[in-house]
Amino acid sequence: MSVIYLDNNATTRVADEVLEAMLPYFCQYYGNPASMHTFGGQVEKEIVRAKERIVSLLGISDITEIVIMSCGTESDNAAIHGTLESYPHRRHIVTTKVEHPAVLNLCRHLSRSGYQVTELPVDSEGMLSLDELRAAITENTAIVSVMYANNETGVIFPIEEIGQVVKEKGSMFHVDAVQAVGKIPLNLATSSIDLLSLSGHKLHGPKGVGALYVRKGTRFKPFMIGGHQERGRRGGTENSGGIIGLGKACELAEAHINDENTRVKALRDRLEKALLTSVPNVRLNGHKAHRLPNTTNVSFEYVEGEAILLLLDSHEIAAASGSACTSGSLEPSHVLRAMGIPFTFAHGSIRFSLSVYNTEKEIDTVIRVVPEIIAKLRAISPYWKEATAKTKARGAGQPTRKAAS
């Protein structure tokens, strides 16, 4: 099956080079990297090399600032729990209404355990107000946790400006950068970020491995209690193959970062422009400029996103109607609701997220297929028929009857 895969914010294919780097560490070099013998020690050396590749992508050089995790969710949980345990007298958390469930649901869980949680709103373009952030942080605030880039809209928050506000107020600053790492250049050496989460499967690495950046000197208590692994900051036998795969994926991402921000961005822009001009009653969701180069989220009025996805799937095109972690819900995206997107549009939102593996030919196919799908669905939509009838009536100068109150 030759699928046109445009759901790369949900997960990515494992790069061939990554798989090749991982395979020897399952059956050939399978020693425990914590062992004293040479057979295990040679694996530890490759793990160190992998961490060197991770820090290079992040713009730092000290591998002791990296703690290996199993995924982005664990990394987020470890950052927030580790900070709260380090500052037990502080009982306030600040986050936003558009965070990934890994952060948002954790914070809501903590609110039921006695913590005060402030969820900051966003505007119609998905952007955060620095003034509202500044007003929300108090002396009791232990941590401010915000995402670098939104997984649904691709909107990039002004992280450095946010960090300056957080540091002025004396709180810890955690950034969920799962969607940003590998797509836009990062330089944590000059950043005010204290903790940053990333995940391997979002940048053509394997599932089941991620990392948490912990700035040197940051107070942090381990979330996963166990052995001495990761300098006592995350217990559990190392996932050697996964870590090595993550390191290779970071090396490739660093090499491809320019392609991501030029060719891939141009493909995204071409797709977006075509949909916005060829389909009536469509809107772009999120800030036009401050977005990831691979992501576009568009809403088609008076059609259901799930129906669009099913018809796209029949053409072997894979896209999404929201976060993969909430796709089982029929409710409109919490991100779009927070942005105040009208209900008639919010239900018809589709996210296309590209990668370096996408081609111009694939995008041309999507540009051809999507308008046909929307036209087909609107032809059987009573809401679309009603809306177009009202539009025609207004155009003919005929009054439209108001709905009964």
Image: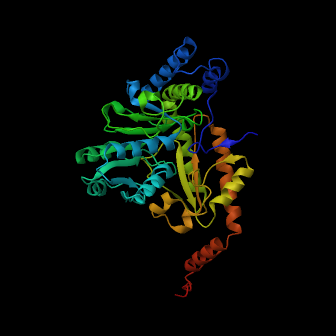
* Residue 316 in sight here: yes
- Considering every residue shown, the one lying at the far right of the view is 1
- Residue 22 lies left or right of residue 154; in this view the side is right
Residue depicted at x 36% and y 47%: 84
| Residue 126: percent from left, percent from top | 43, 55
| Residue 259: percent from left, percent from top | 52, 32
Tell which of 62 and 342 is nearer to you: 62
Tell which of 145 and 299 is nearer to you: 145
- Considering every residue shown, the one lying at the far bottom of the view is 404
Residue depicted at x 64% and y 19%: 24
* Residue 179 in sight here: no
Residue depicted at x 68% and y 47%: 317
Report the quarter where the N terminus lies: top right
- Considering every residue shown, the one lying at the far front of the view is 226
Q: Compared to 202, does 380 lie above or below?
A: below
| Residue 128: percent from left, percent from top | 36, 54
Number of marks drawn:
0
Residue depicted at x 55% and y 18%: 43
- Residue 192 lies left or right of residue 33; in this view the side is left
| Residue 364: percent from left, percent from top | 65, 44
- What colouring method underlies this structural image? rainbow
Tell which of 135 and 266 is nearer to you: 135
Q: Quadrant of residue 357?
A: top right
- Residue 389 lies left or right of residue 105; in this view the side is right
Q: Compared to 190, does 341 lie above or below?
A: below
